[in-house]
Image (cartoon, rainbow, N blue to C red):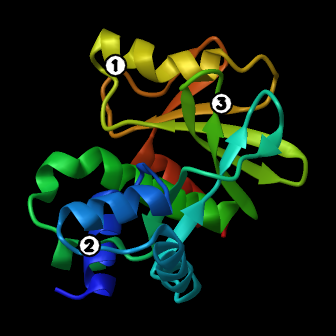
């Protein structure tokens, strides 16, 4: 396995996870493939410049500024990932997050990962102009603990901009949790496609 293939596979296995060149370099070194973080950074630039991956930068929601490290990466073609990554059934959450990211890239000029206080995170903050829209993505929120966990970061945001929880849930229809709208991902995507 050459270095480019190893890094590409690492990225495919880690879509939706915070990643840095140092993290990847350490992983490659542990696999007896020594590489410098600066070289990894050049590989990442090549993978994003070739449009194999998108880089989603982190955005500090409270401070309203972009952060410079530990960004996330999403693959541009989820089908390509399925060719190279085995055991995807256990990774449906990251695949859904990737699909939502791609749809948001179609709808908004700017899409970031929302960084909250401490280690909290909103999956996506999308901008059209100065107006943010917040998105949280999960496979299902039918379990009360999961619902509470997924709503928590959105509830920390004290502004009046739209907030969405996107799931595959069809039971109970669309819900509103104090201004946070729970939507079915498939219906949301179909509505977006019909507006194009």
What is the residue that sits farthest to the left in this orientation?
A: 87
Q: Taking the image as drawn, is residue 122 in sight?
A: yes
Name the quadrant containing residue 167: top left
Dot 1, how many residues are within 10 Å of its Cα: few (below 14), some (14-19), or many (20+)?
A: some
Q: Which residue is mark 3?
A: 163
Name the quadrant containing residue 111: bottom right
Q: Earlier in the sequence, mark 1 or mark 3?
A: 1
The percent position of residue 181, horizontal first and vertical second, equals: 58, 27
The residue nearer to you, when weighing 166 against 59, is 59
How far apart are labels 1 and 2 at the CA level? Answer: 29 Å
Of the 4 image quadrants, the one containing the N terminus is bottom left
The residue nearer to you, when weighing 183 against 8, is 8
How far apart are labels 1 and 3 at the CA level? Answer: 17 Å
The correct choice, above or below, for 144 with respect to 180 in the image is above
Name the secondary structure under disc 1: helix
The percent position of residue 116, horizontal first and vertical second, equals: 64, 27
> Which is more foreground, mark 1 or mark 3?
1
> Which is more foreground, mark 2 or mark 3?
2
Write the residue at 54% across / 26% down: 119
Q: Is residue 76 left or right of residue 28?
A: right
Write the residue at 27% across / 65% down: 29
Q: Earlier in the sequence, mark 1 or mark 2?
A: 2
The percent position of residue 154, horizontal first and vertical second, equals: 61, 23
Q: Which residue is mark 2?
A: 9
Q: Earlier in the sequence, mark 2 or mark 3?
A: 2
How far apart are labels 2 and 3 at the CA level? Answer: 33 Å
């Amino acid at each position: 396995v050459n270095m480019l293939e190893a890094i590409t596979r690492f990225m495919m296995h880690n879509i939706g996870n915070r990643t840095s060149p140092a993290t990847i370099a350490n992983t490659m070194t542990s696999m007896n493939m020594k590489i410098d973080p600066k070289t990894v950074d050049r590989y990442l630039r090549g993978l994003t410049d070739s449009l194999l991956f998108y880089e989603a930068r982190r955005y500090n929601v409270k401070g309203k500024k972009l952060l410079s490290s530990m960004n996330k990466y999403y693959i541009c073609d989820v089908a390509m990932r399925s060719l190279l990554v085995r055991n995807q059934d256990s990774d449906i959450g990251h695949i859904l997050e990737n699909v939502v990211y791609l749809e948001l890239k179609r709808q908004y000029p700017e899409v970031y990962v929302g960084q909250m206080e401490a280690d909290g995170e909103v999956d996506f903050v999308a901008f059209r102009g100065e107006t943010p829209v917040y998105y949280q993505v999960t496979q299902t929120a039918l379990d009360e603990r999961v619902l509470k966990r997924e709503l928590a970061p959105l509830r920390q945001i004290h502004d009046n901009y739209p907030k969405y929880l996107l799931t595959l849930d069809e039971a109970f229809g669309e819900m509103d949790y104090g201004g946070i709208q729970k939507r079915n991902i498939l219906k949301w995507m179909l509505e977006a496609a019909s507006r194009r």
